[in-house]
Image: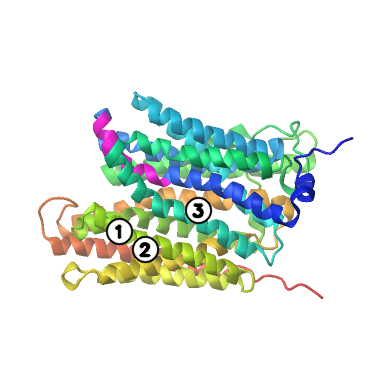
Amino acid sequence: MSQDPHSLQALKVRYGERHRWLLLLSVMLGTMASVMSSTIMNVAIPDMSQHFTLGQTRVQWVSSGFMVAMTVSMLTTPWLLSRFGYRRTYEICMLMLLGGGIAGGLADDYSWVLVARIVEGLAAGVVQPIPVIIIMNAFAPEERGRASGLFGTGVVLAPAIGPSVGGLLVDAFGWRSIFFMVVPLALAALWLARRYVPTTAPGGVQANAASGRLDWWGLLMALLGTVLLLNGMVTWRESGTAQGLPLLLGAALMAACFVAWQMRLQRRFQHHATGAQAPLMDLRVFTHRSFLMGSLVAVTYGTALFGSTYLLPVFMQSGLGLSASYVGSALLPAGFMLAITITLVGRWADRTDKRYLVLVGLVLLTCSFALMSTVDPDRGLLALWLWTIVGRIGLGFILPSLNLGAMQGMPAHLIPQGASVVNFLRMLGGAAGVSLCAIVLEWRLGAMGVALLGAGDAHARLQAFHHTFWFLAVLTALAIIPAWLMSAPAHKKD
């Protein structure tokens, strides 16, 4: 029986020790494509709204639909990798990104634009946990930090540079050019995948097309819960608590049903493993203290991170009266500092307790949010640049350390589940964070008696933003507690 020439074992023989780095580079390009497609579309929304003559709420579904699809599809990654293997799963996702980019760029009807974005979101969600799974499986513990740092540097450069390039493209060629930006990255990722991504499943085992079917009921519950949560937050923001609260209660009920269903499937699968359906989310990952605490950090951190990505540009333009071009120039150096920090921290993570790196990052991020409350245009804008950079340095400490710290000591067979779940929780927190931040800001604006746009007391508007930054600071500080409780790594015996 001949060995598959594209299995993990065969590729290791062909390329030697450098294969794991080539594999990481391959999936890094695909992840950069998915991250860029998720962050860059915001710069095209005003132009798209004008082209299709749509209101802000309806056109915003270009971003919201992508985020819902991406968040929920992350839960399918372990099943897809087990059934189809790395290469086939990855190639399907790149083809979906490619097709979504081309179809969205050529679409003449808004409905098709929305469908293209949802297709891109489904692909982006499946792809994003894969690099962590590869790093945990292909690299020795003392190399994982460096690999995570290298990967993180490439991935954060995409959203750091993307909006600036995207703004120039929109001005020159219109909103369609934003869809086409993903095409060259997806094509390059497909070419690399044919050379370096193995056909085997995580752990080097053969993909099993006869494995159990996907937990469609669990996926439906996760989808409904996510949609109810996001719609509940948006409705609360736009129409008040009375209309938003029932949707949020529905999301909580759906989450409880999802957990109960997963526990039922888990019991059946353990007793009848040969024919029973595996759960979409293996809840055994939460029995590991590091993962449980890391998950709490991921939810809180995701809420604060995504909330701040919404708040910072709005603060600079509406609170400080800065132009859009100045906002881009203010955020670009911070993006490069983030990339540099990730590279350095990735190397430290191989020699340091990852809890301490996460803690340093959370403290810096908390300080950045708190110090934003001191920014006043009457005293100059140097502080704005400094505190933005401090926050991005904090993110650079957290990004390469959190996933590795959360999954240290986890059994190899649970690593795909762990990577999928922690990314899902971070994105779920992030999806809620944007609306939560907007709710707090509008509450403070109302309390100050001013509107976000238009005439009014500029100092009162600035105070409302300052209070919202304090809210983010307190929220981030809360994540310090579970970060401290993450287990220290076990020392190897000689």
Extreme residue in the bottom direction: 494
Give the camera-side residue of 292 and 169: 169
Magenta stretch mostly in which secondary structure? Answer: helix
**Left or right: where 357 falls relative to 4:** left
Q: Quadrant of residue 10?
A: top right
Q: Which residue is identified by label 1?
A: 329
**Left or right: where 354 falls relative to 176:** right
Residue sitting at x 49%, y 43%: 34
- Residue 369: x and y in percent read 35, 67
**Magenta stretch containing residue 321, yes or no?**
no
Where does the N terminus fall, quadrant-wise? Answer: top right
Residue sitting at x 23%, y 68%: 381
Helix, strand or loop status at disc 2: helix
Q: Quadrant of residue 58?
A: top left
Give amino acid for label 2. Pro
Span highlighted in magenta in the image: 39-51
**Rendered image: mark on residue 233:** none
Q: CA gap, disc 3 to disc 2?
A: 16 Å
Residue sitting at x 27%, y 57%: 327
Give amino acid for label 3. Val
Give the camera-side residue of 210 and 144: 144
Is the residue under label 1 in contact with that under label 2 (CB below 8 Å)?
Answer: yes
Q: Which residue is identified by label 2?
A: 333
How many neighbours does mark 3 have within 10 angstroms: few (below 14), some (14-19), or many (20 or more)? Answer: many
How many neighbours does mark 2 have within 10 angstroms: few (below 14), some (14-19), or many (20 or more)? Answer: some
Using the rendered image of the protein, determine whether residue 236 is visible from the camera's viewpoint: no
Quick check: 459 above or below 278? below
Going from N to C along the chain, the mark reached first, 3 or 2, is: 3
**Rendered image: mark on residue 155:** 3
How many neighbours does mark 1 have within 10 angstroms: few (below 14), some (14-19), or many (20 or more)? Answer: few
